[in-house]
Amino acid sequence: RNEDLEVEEDDAENLLTAMEQELLRRRFGPVVRLEVAEDISQTVLDFLIDRLEISEQDVLRLPEPLDLTALNDLHDLDLPHLKYPKYVPVTPKGLAEYESARAGDIFSSIRNHDVLLHHPYDSFATSVQHFVATAAADPKVLAIKQTLYRTSGDSPIVKALIDAAHAGKQVVAIVEIKARFDEEANISWARKLERAGVHVVYGMVGLKTHCKLSMVVREESDGLRRYCHVGTGNYHPKTARGYEDLGLLTCDREVGQDLTRLFNQLSGYAPRTTFHRLLVAPMSIRSGLIERIDEQIERKKRGEEAYIGIKVNSIVDEAVIDALYRASRAGVPVDLVVRGICGIRAGVKDLSENIRVRSILGRYLEHSRIYCFGPEGSEEVWIGSADLMHRNLDRRVEALVRITDEGQVAYLSKLLRTEASDDVTSWHLRGDGSWVRHTHGKKGRKLTDIQEVLMENASSRVKGRKVF
């Protein structure tokens, strides 16, 4: 059935109540399509078509099984020999020199340097979750501001925000109650947060708040300091174990100013503004990325080395695609790692001969977004929540943050280049739009599983842990 919810935000005096009413109507939404087994009897099919008030054009005959969510029940069976071996995430490099049952001083670690997080190889529990929970309990913390798009019902993040409010801290939660299929859950814990004294804001009219941001304001001996987290994935402890995502923990002054301004905008207390280390949709992500693509084109025209690397879930935005085609025609090498919808063609003569597109499907769902511009050693790298789709660039509040630490820039650049290379198991997009899976190289050599390599690298940081 049609799962879209139609709420006139301008007219809805109480958005929460309006959404609850729409959720009741969803179960009676008009039928979008009817999926049936290929061998269904015509009598039964005619009955369904009649009662559901649809036409033959709305019917899809598919090979069984139809409802693949049943595979979740199969996965829950106790059959360890048919599953991946368990992997235990490690404390992120930069937050602790070694694994310990006692958590370290996370604020001290962030003061020393920016910390790059790479989940699920780096533990969400000992990084992001620990960051918010520590802030909630720390008497020096005055305020916590947080966006929430999707999270679990028993989320320790939500619990920490409630604890912080009970402790008398100023807590602001930007809750997106229009997150598709999570509307009911989001409404439930939005009400819990409100009852606890959290200032709950439901975002900006006409826009979904999809950016992944958290800011902690702490009183220290030298004055107030803002600690920030900018991520590519949701504040969801469960999906953080199965989704590949990136995050940045920093107390950089410019990022703190940017997040202050953005949170003020989201809560309705500030006009449009400019940012230092952020690109923010719907204002500046598309134009900012195209500007950087054009800079690489100019570098190539001057005879200098140029490069563009992008990793996203989906790419369908025509303006960005056209800019990448221009870059390819100018001779700029373009690497794209796209897990989902891909509206670009690779290797087409006189159009995209310098573009290669890869897709990595493995144990974990590749979910991070990386934007890299420039040759090795002088790259400009951004991470954040935005895919290259109209909904992300025009109808959502998204944020990308520029990575400034040289080691982290090198890590992300190398990661992207490796995933796009011919040395890694992946799907390759051909010029005719078809995908071909590559698991072995020349002479039958088995290609690298990048997810296994990242698990091994993370595990090798733990003294005494077996590296598989």
Image (cartoon, rainbow, N blue to C red):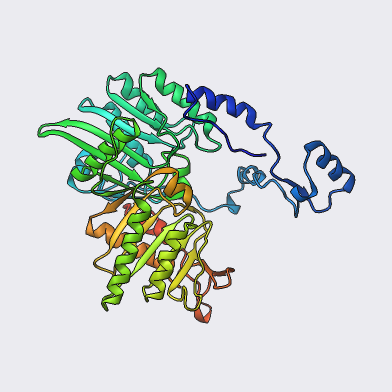
Q: Residue furthest left?
A: 222
* Number of numbered discs overlaid on the protein picture: 0
**Residue 21 x/y as whole percent:** 58, 24
Q: Quadrant of residue 70?
A: top right
Residue depicted at x 33% and y 69%: 307
**Would residue 261 be seen by someone viewing this image from the given angle?**
yes
Closest to the observer: 122 or 196? Answer: 196
Q: Is residue 303 above or below residue 317?
A: below
Q: Residue furthest front?
A: 11
Closest to the observer: 439 or 269? Answer: 269
**Residue 216 x/y as whole percent:** 26, 34
**Residue 312 x/y as whole percent:** 44, 56
Quadrant location of the N terminus in the rendered image? top right
Residue depicted at x 24% and y 38%: 227
**Would residue 452 be seen by someone viewing this image from the given angle?**
no
Residue depicted at x 41% and y 75%: 329
- Relative to residue 159, is residue 26 drawn left or right? right
- Relative to residue 445, is residue 288 drawn left or right? left
